[in-house]
Amino acid sequence: MNILVVDDEPAQRNLLAGFLQKQGHSVKTAGSGRDAIELNKHNTFDLVILDLKMPELDGVETMAQMKKIDPMTYFIILTGYGTVESAVQAMKIGAYDYLNKPINLDELEIIIARINEEKGLHQELNLLRDEIKEIFPTDSFIAQSKKMKEILKIVNRVAKSDAAVLILGESGTGKEMIARLIHQMSPRKDRQFVPISCAALPETLLESELFGYEKGAFTGAEKRRYGKFELAHQGTLFLDEIGDLPLSTQVKLLRVLQEFTFERLGSNTPIKVNVRLISATNQDLKKKIARGKFREDLYYRLNVININIPPLRQRREDIPVLAEYFLKKFSQRSHKEIKGITPDALKRLVRYDWPGNIRELENVIERAVVLCPGDYITIKEIPLEWHTEEESGSLAEMEKVHIKKILEKTGWNLSEAAKILGIHRNTLRAKIKEYDIK
Ligand SMILES: Nc1ncnc2c1ncn2[C@@H]1O[C@H](COP(=O)(O)OP(=O)(O)OP(=O)(O)O)[C@@H](O)[C@H]1O
Ligand SMILES: [Mg+2]
């Protein structure tokens, strides 16, 4: 990596530069904010390690100006004791991380490794796409995490068979996508993939949708209509939101699944189909069974193979790759040439818990692309409601950790700790209580 170390103390500067050079980085140094900015005009840095307290231009101001020159640079801020507020400030305006002096070099190494990982992402994404493309007929399915790669292996295996698959996962985790993938990879791929949502329709309508009807079967049935089962003949039927299936329809469905034979509404002629069944739900079917809301025998019919898609917050490695993928997709669509997501914005995306999972991430990126005035998506384009909440959460956490560290260093001497932290003793007491530090 190209690294710039900015510190007004030569000893500190040289120590860091020496260490980083030994690690194989190419390192430049600057003794002031102005020099750093000047250097940045003719050099690109992957990472800038910046002392917070410097005469003239301080770290925060220097970072702000350097970000204007290159928004994709990562910043690590060095803080002395007594500057927790400023460290918080630095994080707020977009430092990637901060380190307390005296610097723990192991900690620095860990942060750099993480940055390296994120920066390597771009090449990796393309490699990964090639790898997935080799087996899968799509390049729009993103799987970076171990968990998702495992799922892809299962998909690959089950696609060849006709076994019923039940896909579980919170809303927006990609259940329908997996179902389509299984179909596309199966020998049935040239036949229809027929989705039907069991939640969207009232009971009677659901049955006529599934099984079809004859002309005159009920008032309004003006001509024969084929049901989804028939349409999916030799293809795949995708029963979405299966947890919402009414009990009476469950009984009928179970009967059909035993022989794959049924009648259209208003007809006595049995029709036999060859259908591969995939179902999905975000509900806890076991619980429904326990409450008598879902038939256990149907559950076993549907659940020959089980695929459980973990929520996005349990596979955060997928977030940067997905974000980059959606960024490309939406910038192409809106004819914008957005080059990337700034490191601090990306970090925020990775930390958020995504209750709406991938669909929510997709929406957030789409919106950011539309709003983005420049070359890069920054924290400004990420919806405020949650980013401030998330941020105050993590900043409070940071302050808590910092205060605790100082308290332990001083052996819980409140006056000394307060002095080091640069706050009044009463403020410190209040914070200890607020954060419940022990
Ligand atoms: N691995 C992935 N790679 C790329 N895009 C994905 C991936 N998983 C999901 N998506 C996208 O996220 C959105 C939600 O996916 P999908 O509709 O398959 O989720 P779902 O689990 O069926 O959601 P719901 O429960 O709300 O119906 C879709 O736009 C889909 O294209
Ligand atoms: Mg769905």
Image (cartoon, rainbow, N blue to C red):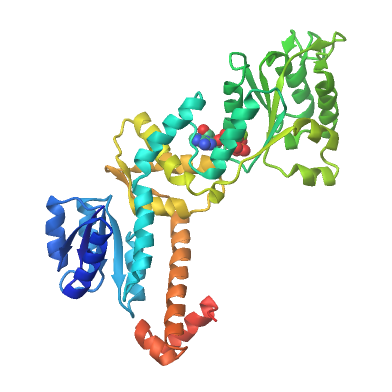
- Please tell me which residue lies in front, 99 or 252: 99
Q: Is residue 266 left or right of residue 433?
A: right
Where residue 321 appears, as percent x and y from the top left, is: 43, 41
Where residue 207 appears, as percent x and y from the top left, is: 78, 23
In this view, 27 is above or below 207: below
Q: Residue furthest front?
A: 22
Q: Residue at x 32, y 77 (%)?
A: 83
Q: Residue at x 56, y 44 (%)?
A: 147
Q: Is residue 161 left or right of residue 339?
A: right
- Please tell me which residue lies in front, 153 or 203: 153
Image quadrant in which you'd find residue 274: top right
Image quadrant in which you'd find residue 214: top right
Regarding residue 50, the answer to whether it shows in the image is yes
Q: Is residue 260 left or right of residue 11?
A: right
Q: Is residue 183 left or right of residue 13?
A: right
In this view, 362 is above or below 207: below
Where residue 285 appears, as percent x and y from the top left, is: 76, 42
Q: Residue at x 86, y 29 (%)?
A: 251
- Please tell me which residue lies in front, 244 or 33: 33
In this view, 397 is above or below 94: below
Where residue 221 appears, as percent x and y from the top left, is: 76, 12
Regarding residue 176, the answer to whether it shows in the image is no
Q: Residue at x 32, y 61 (%)?
A: 93
Quadrant in which ligand 2 is drawn: top right
